[in-house]
């Protein structure tokens, strides 16, 4: 999806209290905390800490698109295993931290939880990085365990889950499609009309992890306490991430 660029200050919906911080972009005034001015004429929003780029007259995310000759093109799909890093420069505690498998969920900024049976011995992968593979809108954990571990959005709150080893079980209504993984770009959630990902703070005091959650028009208000993030695709050095993620 591409966003139209804005050229009219009135579209910004800014209260007069914000005027002191406004800057000028061609004929418009804008809040530099929320918009970037391109070629002194076009405003693009800042979303999830990313100042969207300009291509022709359209604003775009470099997590998904590239621009050539004023035309947007989707980045190529990733075809090899990758790990993921949180991206939002306005959230220093999470920016560049890994997405980590733990407790059958994708968590943020913590260690990876994995397991390898003793009998596998020296063939066990290190299992300390959370690696993923993706194709045709689906994703799976990059594991050796027979049957694999599929990635899905849970039906109750769109947390990112993965199936337990040796089981294909996932709750009814789970979403297994609508993921995009782009080389040189990001891992995007295309479910729910482009509301993307949010990082939700730990729910238990004194412990717990940040969680990755997919957002949509219905859940946006309930997720107001979470922060929008992008996920950057990082090529994985090894071939397989773990025997199984736990
Ligand atoms: C995993 O462990 C290997 C050594 O066994 C180390 O080289 C690598 O940096 C570790 N990776 C992470 C993500 O901790
Ligand atoms: C939006 O997400 C919620 C989970 O937070 C889910 O229950 C709901 O079905 C989703 N809505 C749509 C329209 O997909």
Image (cartoon, grey):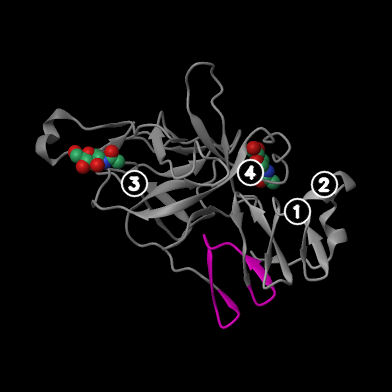
SS at mark 2 in the image: helix
Cβ of disc 4 within 8 Å of ligand 2? yes
Q: In front: mark 3 or mark 2?
A: 2
Compare residues 86 and 238 and report the one nearer the observer. 86
Q: In front: mark 1 or mark 3?
A: 1
Circle 1 residue: 31
Which residue reaches farthest bottom? 69
Q: Is residue 126 visible?
A: no
For image coordinates 31% across by 43% down, the residue present is 147
The answer to which image quadrant residue 225 occupies is: top right
- Write down the region rendered in magenta: 55-72
Q: Is residue 62 covered in magenta? A: yes
Q: How many marks?
A: 4
Q: Which mark is residue 215?
A: 4
SS at mark 4 in the image: loop
Considering only order in the chain, which callout, 1 or 2, is on the residue closer to the N terminus? 2
SS at mark 1 in the image: loop
Label 4, residues with CA under 10 Å away: few <14, some 14-19, many ≥20: many
């Amino acid at each position: 999806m591409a966003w139209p660029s804005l050229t009219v200050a009135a579209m910004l919906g800014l209260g007069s209290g914000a005027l002191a911080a406004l800057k000028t972009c061609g004929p418009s005034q804008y809040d530099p905390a929320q918009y970037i001015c391109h070629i002194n004429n076009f405003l693009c929003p800042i979303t999830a800490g990313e100042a969207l780029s300009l291509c022709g007259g359209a604003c775009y995310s470099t997590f998904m698109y590239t621009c050539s000759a004023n035309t947007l093109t989707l980045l190529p799909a990733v075809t090899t295993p990758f790990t993921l890093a949180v991206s939002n420069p306005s959230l220093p505690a999470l920016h560049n931290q890994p997405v980590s498998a733990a407790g059958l969920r994708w968590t943020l900024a913590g260690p990876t939880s994995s397991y390898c049976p003793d009998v596998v011995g020296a063939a066990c992968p290190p299992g300390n990085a959370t690696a993923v593979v993706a194709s045709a809108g689906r994703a799976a954990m990059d594991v050796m365990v027979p049957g694999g571990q599929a990635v899905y959005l849970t039906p109750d709150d769109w947390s990112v889950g993965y199936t337990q080893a040796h089981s294909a079980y996932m709750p009814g209504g789970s979403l297994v499609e609508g993921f995009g993984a782009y080389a040189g770009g990001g891992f995007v959630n295309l479910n729910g009309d482009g509301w993307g990902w949010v990082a939700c703070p730990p729910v238990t005091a004194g412990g717990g992890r940040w969680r990755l959650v997919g957002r949509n028009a219905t859940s946006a208000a309930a997720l107001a306490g979470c922060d929008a993030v992008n996920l950057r695709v990082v090529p994985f050095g090894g071939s397989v991430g773990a025997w199984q993620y736990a």
